[in-house]
Amino acid sequence: MRFFQHLFYKPYDATLHVTSKNGFHLRPIAQFVSLAKQYPCSITASGKGREEVDAKGVNRLLSLSLEQGDSFTLTCRGKRAEEALNALKALFATLMQNDRETTAQEKSSHHYEGRTVEGEIIYGGVAMAPLYRYREIRSRQASGLSFKEAVTAGMDELTALGKAENTKAEIYLAQRALLDSLQAEVSTLEALEALVQEQCAELSGTPLEAKIGDYHDILQRVAAKLGSKTEMLLPEGAFILAAEDLLPSQIEALSQSDIEGVLLEKSSLASHTAILLREAGIPSLIVKTALPAEGERVILDACSGVVVDTPTSKDFHEAEKQLQAQKKETEAAWGKRFEAAETKEGKKIRVLANIMHTDTLEQAKEEGAEGIGLLRTEFLFKEQKPTLGMQVDAYEKVFSVFDDVTVRTLDVGGDKALPYIDLPRETNPFLGIRGIRLFQTHPELMEEQLHAIFLAAEGKAASIKIMFPMVSSVEEFIHAKTFAEQTAVKYGIDISSHLFGIMVEVPSVLFAIDAFNQVVDFYSIGTNDLTQYLFAIERTHPLLKPDPLAPPLFAALRHIVAQAEKPVSFCGELAADRKALPKLLELGIGTLSVSAKNVARTKEEIRNV
């Protein structure tokens, strides 16, 4: 009845264009559907000559197989239809902008004597071990669960796996949304198998073919809950695994085995399997050519992008040298991770960590981070607005582990939509309401965040650094700092020991450093946005990519360091780039902040400069 009622409402529609090279794939679709479900109206999508589908179903949207360059029509009918359309258009623009392309890695040269097989690099590294072909074993036993109960158990499991703040979690949450969509169309395992086969056949041969693995992963998870288990058979001792493809959920088990490397024949760089192999740090290639017989000891050189399937003794010797050099480098960095990083000339460089969730705290500590140079607080602000208590708990956790912490205030808006923040639709969100501009548009949100930070820092001996993002003028900074001071007075909290600074990412700041010197306590340079605005190229543009080592960028950095009279740190991942690091140190920057996993390696790189 509700469907027919929608027919009497005026339809609101828009044509949306897929600009991401990855197409409109599972993870962004899952986010899109999550927002669509919050509206009571009917929401449909049609495109590529296909029939209209329910845009509240992940599976249905995926069936459109929307690739880069495709367009589709989004239609909303019913209560709050216009509001839904505007919200979904804004979110879609954000999803397209933020969906980074997975590019092929640059290959190093090699001089192997034996026959080599070329491949695409998933993750670099060198491995030598016997080749082992993928095998699996299936077992069946009664589980006592109904199909509905098995689906619920599978969804609960995926929800638990999705609680971390990383790409792996995003993948599992997207799979959960897909399973939710699939189970709405079927009522038995046999029907689910048939639907999965149908959907995989539609995706086959399209750029979204890489998502077939997610369908099979979901099917296998539900089947396991019903007693039909499929397990990999892995050998004892070191091995290199060759398989047509692997399921995303299998990578965790591989990480716990004696695996040295992986060769996939029918995967892609954009598949969730490839993404998880990279996160696990397993040297791996995609190889389309026939591989050698099982049991033969081969060389997997995922730095050069080759498999040596008939290696000579000289080839093994050369590969062993590379392997030992890698191990030595890793061990040296790890062994000295808690030591200060000092250049060959004796200059000490502090290395801090950028984190986007409290789950990364222990990793940052264990890697030898000397503090938190950038706490991205956006992790707290998801689909549901965090309470004051939730924020206080999170900040207290960070402050309890590290003394030196720089907290960046909320950097959302425009290109980072939140359902509970009402913002106007903007033609170019990167130039709109975001970062420090939220102090003007959403003062209540910013007051609560500052209140939480101040409460969490009470009684802490060390000073807390509070950093405002997207500052473009001295007046903006003064307004935000005054706002913070007034908030402290309102709640009776002493913040006299806290420091206030800015993230340098808007070019106008370069021409006002003298004035900023009079009011800020510190500067932190973020190159992602600074590069974007310097070169007038959106940082997520699918075609245009500025050179991260371009002279104009380093000229801007040199100017900032030379003119600044307050401490300057660098919190861009460019600091973890081996080519960029010496250039950054030449500028005189004494504090670098990189992702937690890169802290120990960056320290070791500094020691070699």
Image: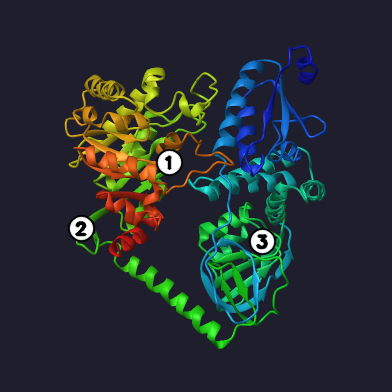
Left or right placement of residue 427 versus residue 581 in this view? right
Percent x, y of residue 198: 82, 47
- Residues 30 and 49: in front is 49
Percent x, y of residue 222: 70, 51
Residue 347: mark in rendering: 2
Q: Label 1: how many residues lie within 10 Å, few (<14), some (14-19) or many (20+)?
A: some
Task: Check disc 3 and report the residue beneath it.
Answer: 246
Residue 596: mark in rendering: none
Left or right placement of residue 200 versus residue 270 in this view? right
Model colouring? rainbow
Amino acid of disc 1: Asn
Q: What kind of element bears circle 3?
A: loop
Q: What kind of element bears circle 1?
A: helix
Task: Check disc 1 and report the residue beneath it.
Answer: 528
| Residue 33 quadrant | top right
Q: Quadrant of the N terminus?
A: top right
Q: What kind of element bears circle 2?
A: loop
Q: Quadrant of the C terminus?
A: bottom left
The earlier-in-sequence mark between 3 and 2 is 3
Residue at figure coordinates x 41%, y 20% from the top left:
442
Q: Label 3: how many residues lie within 10 Å, few (<14), some (14-19) or many (20+)?
A: many
Q: Label 2: how many residues lie within 10 Å, few (<14), some (14-19) or many (20+)?
A: some
- Residues 331 and 227: in front is 331
Residue at figure coordinates x 55%, y 38% from the top left:
541
Disc 3 versus disc 1: nearer the observer: 1
Amino acid of disc 2: Lys
User: Taking the image as drawn, is residue 367 in sight?
Assistant: no
The earlier-in-sequence mark between 2 and 1 is 2
